[in-house]
Image (spheres, rainbow, N blue to C red):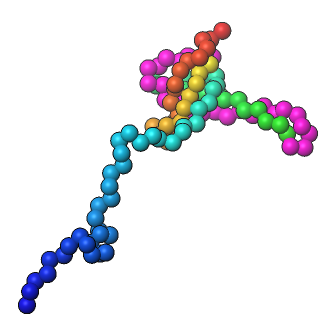
Amino acid sequence: MSEETPTTDTPVAAAVEAPKPVAAGRARGTRRVRNGEVVSKSGDKSLVVRAERRRIHPVYGKVVREFKKFHVHDEKNAAKVGDLVEIAECRPMSKMKCWRLVAVTGAKA
């Protein structure tokens, strides 16, 4: 009786091999970016930003302004209430915060 050692040429052994790691230089997907106004400083390193979206009403043809609030992570506490800011989508920082502050585009008037 001869003992056979498993080789990597068999289909079973090939299926068990570990997947190859993703290249380090691979680009991430595009992240959503919004512009808005800081309406609340809800805590340390946290903001609430109101972003405006304009769309045309499907029946009446009027331009309708829609607003949505985003909870934003501000690492440097750079923004103040009333500032115009640019935010980008990121990994979840907490239950409600999944956006981060990119830049303060306009100071409070």
Q: Is residue 34 left or right of residue 97?
A: right
Instruction: Tell whether position 101 is magenta.
Output: no
Residue drawn at x 47%, y 41% is 28
Q: Farthest residue toward the right?
A: 60
Q: Locate the N terminus by quadrant.
A: bottom left
* Rendering quarter of residue 2: bottom left
Residue drawn at x 19%, y 75% is 6
Residue 42 percent coordinates (x, y) = 53, 26
Residue 53 percent coordinates (x, y) = 72, 32
Q: Farthest residue toward the left?
A: 1
Q: Farthest residue toward the top?
A: 109
Instruction: Tell whether position 76 is magenta.
Output: yes
Q: Is residue 102 left or right of residue 53?
A: left
Q: Locate the C terminus by quadrant.
A: top right
Which residue is nearer to you in this view: 8 or 38?
Answer: 8
Bounds of the magenta span?
58-83
* Rendering quarter of residue 64: top right
Residue 79 percent coordinates (x, y) = 53, 18
Residue 84 visible (yes or no): yes
Q: Is residue 11 left or right of residue 38?
A: left
Residue 94 visible (yes or no): no
Image vertical order of residue 2 relative to residue 47, above or below: below
Residue drawn at x 32%, y 70% is 15
Which residue is nearer to you in this view: 12 or 46?
Answer: 12
Residue drawn at x 23%, y 70% is 8
Q: Is residue 22 left or right of residue 40?
A: left
Image vertical order of residue 24 relative to residue 107, above or below: below
Residue 70 percent coordinates (x, y) = 60, 33
* Rendering quarter of residue 24: top left
